[in-house]
Image (cartoon, rainbow, N blue to C red):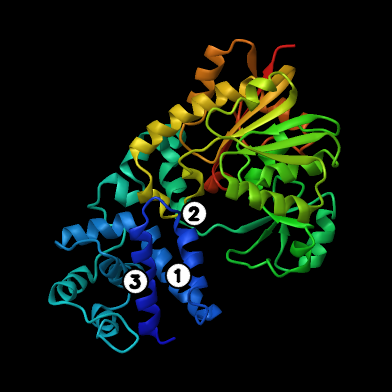
Amino acid sequence: MTPEARIAAAIALLEGVAAQPRRPADAIAAEFFRARRFIGGGDRRAVSDLAWGALRQRLRLEWHLAAVGAPATPRLLVLAQMVLGQKVPAAAALRAFAGGRFGPEAASPAEAAAARALEGRPLADPAMPEGPRLNLPEWALPGLRRRFGEALAAEAAALEGVAPLDLRANALKATRAAVLAGLGAPAEATRFSPWGVRLPPRTSVAAHPLFKDGAVEVQDEGSQLIAALVGAQPGMRVADYCAGAAGKTLAMAASMDNRGRIVACDVSAARLAGADKRLRRAGVHNAETHLLSPGDRWAKRRAGQFDRVLVDAPCTGTGTWRRNPDARVRTTGADLAELVAKQGEILSISAQLVRPGGRLAYATCSLLPEEDEDQVERFLAANPAFQAVPLSRAWAEAGLPGAPPCDGPHLALSPAAHGTDGFFCAVLERAG
């Protein structure tokens, strides 16, 4: 592809994202490239870098475009990213918008004027309000200030980075040492998870024999630690109530050595179909899936039957913005309020499943106290039969090495402090 064709493809990708505002950008991108198999690996990376750069910096780009009186169209977002993010001179950027055969349509006089007006501006302008200056949406700022205080700027900068690729060695098939040897450099052991292996960002492992054989699974180190804190042991009955594609189900099955029973529940048949494939590849024999549907009485019929219940609750995903930069603008304050209510409902339903003396682990990939500590406090106030298990105790009982990576009663991980995605987990025990 010519440079101009790459730019045109990046614009087309952003147009696809704009046309489906409630759908994750990574899913849209996967579909976009599947329909354009002629785009080779190098070109695909260049197109993705430009489009994802515009998504990652969208809050700032929108502020700059508004300041020069221009709308935030996909074309102008790409043009602004080239001038502000990639430091391409405006004249050179506009030459790519000359209306060539495979390039984007020629820049209009207004677009050309906007590009020239943007040249020389700092991407993170000191004149910006705090939100765009830190590249954080206004609706999330109060919660993030509560979480991080003076460390907010450092955490915001970390959320702008590109996440590494973390794998979990599947103990049913391989040790971490064997996985590290099989992958070779630059694979390295993770800091906290004894099963974790870290690779550079954008490493592809789908064709590697270790992945095809199920000896490794893609899973962020923080997610691995949550699965461990559930404390699932051989012979137990475990419910993964919001299982999705079953990443944590797979990890718990390994900790149970395929003994006992896990039920992976979700409201999405498509996600559970993906879970079934992953379970087979990983050699998991002690798990089954259950599709939750409106009016489902499954939880009531199985009240008090589970030793461990994991609720990996639907959330804003603020802790995953390195991987999903579009969520910064796709999620709203109204979404946060709706999710907080939904999380409370899910906690109330799933708590019924826990037997006396059993444990309920509540987890999110959110950095917001409204979805994390506040949610746990409300649940404990309404459910006096449950009490929080201190993180230090849950960590030691899970057999995790050393001391927990953070202070406080619950696990609270962040990209700047721990190098993981942002995760929260509280372990709650029901009185016997």
Please tell me which residue is depicted at 50% across the width and 18% down the height of the picture.
378
- Asked which secondary structure carries label 1, the reply is helix
Residue at the disc numbered 2? 322
Which residue was labeled with disc 3?
A: 11
Graded by Cα atoms within 10 Å as few (under 14), some (14 to 19) or many (20 or more), the crowding at tag 1 reads some
Question: Which residue type carries mark 3?
Answer: Ile
First along the sequence among labels 2 and 3: 3
Q: Where residue 318 sits in the image (x, y, percent)?
A: 46, 44
**Viewer-nearest residue: 19 or 357:** 19
Q: Is residue 271 visible?
A: yes
Q: How far, Cα to Cα, is label 1 from label 2?
A: 13 Å
Give me the residue at 34% from left, 45% from top. Answer: 137
- Which quadrant is the C terminus positioned in? top right
Label annotation for residue 49: 1
Q: Residue at x 26, y 53 (%)?
A: 126
Query: What amino acid type should be assigned to the residue bearing mark 2?
Result: Arg
Q: Which mark is residue 401?
A: none
